[in-house]
Image (spheres, rainbow, N blue to C red):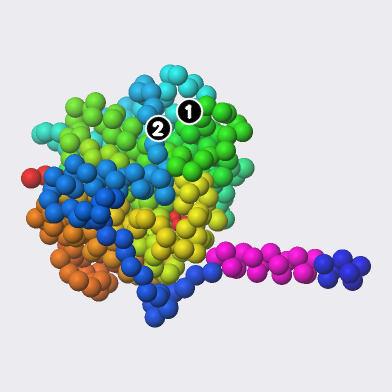
Amino acid sequence: MIKIFRIGVFAVYCTSVAFGQARRSNEDESRVGQYTLPDVLKCADGTTVTTVADWTGKRRAEVMRLFEEHVYGKTPATPKLDAKVLSERKDALGGIATRRIVRLKMKEKPAWDGIDVMIYIPNGAKKPVPAFVGLSFGGNHAVSPDIDVPISDRWMRPTQDDTVRNSRATVRSRGKESHRWPLEMILKRGYAVVTAYYGDIEPDHTLGWKDGVRGALAEKGADTVWKDGEWGAIGAWAWGLSRMLDYAETVDAIDAKHCSVIGHSRLGKTSLWAGAQDERFAMVVSNDSGEGGAAIMRRDFGETTKIITTVFPHWFTPTYARYSDKAGDCPVDQHMLISLMAPRPVCIASAEEDLWADPKGEFLSGLNAQPVYDLFGLKGVGVKHQPAVNTPVGDVVRYHMRTGKHDVTDFDWQRYLDAADAHLKK
Ligand code: GTR
């Protein structure tokens, strides 16, 4: 009996040590260590980019390939999606907007349930309006305060509260995410919103691909082993954002040439990868995206490559896990991802208490994208050091760190709306 008890205690101890090590992270700036960032302008053949033509005609494609190969995987070409309008309401949000819900599906792959896209367009606009295109964690019914938005019946991540039961959303999840989507504020500033639940594209767990678009398209079926260079879940979610933009292009009331892609946290990593791949996105917004997003991977601060690839291996291409504990060997770092947005505007946001996402590392990727913005003669963040809290900086590349925790707040949205006013409504 005593022996069994001892074995039990030992097992719990081992598990907690292993878990503790996997989560080990540094939050002390003095212990970050030395690192050298790869030179974004240096081509594979050893030459250095000095002109816009060299960048757009040569180096940009090389950097894209490196991110495909080493971090996110390559997005395959896919059949066009069909759109079916499920509902439309002209007096949504108390009358200020028209709301449409559309299901995007692939005729060739009926097993995949498709993406239910929810669109809000301000009523009374005199001309087409730019939209913010972004995914949610909890579904359209969690984003919207409108109580006639259907509750998602797809797989949901377990929560500590009663908003999810048996991996399905409960009625308690209505409006749960609406503080992150201040629809009224966005619409009143003259922008549309195009959103969908990220789990429609692929459920967020290691076997989620089986019920998502990656599984629907995989040739080998359920026993598929994802190979180096093949896309992960972030790639799939980013693909979904582009398909949402495809649909936005068909909506007369939306100015699809001036749409922004936006995302928070893992969905911020996703919006960056979507913005890099799809240059139709006229502005790119990363809210607290952290490791694998805007944060410099070579900085040993907060979440590390080892932690993220251990806890969320399905997000990336398998190759990325090779850089656990040796991020310095990776041929890219995240300033190169930000560089892929040039000459388009990009907003990078951090939160003061969100040390896990490495606010300084997020700032440094914006700062170190400057050589590429310089080629275009554009001002980036415009400062050399991370600005104080609640002091937004930058023009084409914008950065702010607000007070508070890992989240999306009205303060963040005001910054994004200001950036869109400055660059997309000219
Ligand atoms: C964390 C993860 C982060 C971030 C976050 C989120 O657990 O370590 O990289 O993506 O989740 O998406 O909420």
The quadrant the C terminus occupies is top left
What residue does disc 1 label?
217
Tag 2 residue? 76
The verdict on residue 388 being magenta is no
Label 2 crowd bin: few (<14), some (14–19), many (20+), radius 10 Å: few
Pinpoint residue 395: horizontal percent, then vertical percent.
14, 58
Badge 2 marks a residue whose secondary structure is loop
* Depicted 406 relative to depicted 416: above or below: below
Q: Residue furthest right?
A: 1
Q: Main secondary structure of the magenta part?
A: helix
* Secondary element at tag 1: helix
Q: Is residue 261 visible?
A: no
Residue found 42% across the figure and 42% down from its top: 73
Q: Is residue 76 left or right of residue 160?
A: left
**Which residue lies at the image location 55% right of the left edge and 56% below the top edge?**
310
Q: Quadrant of the N terminus?
A: bottom right
Front residue of 144 and 265: 265
Q: Which segment is the magenta one? A: 8-23
User: At label 1, which amino acid type do we have?
Assistant: Leu
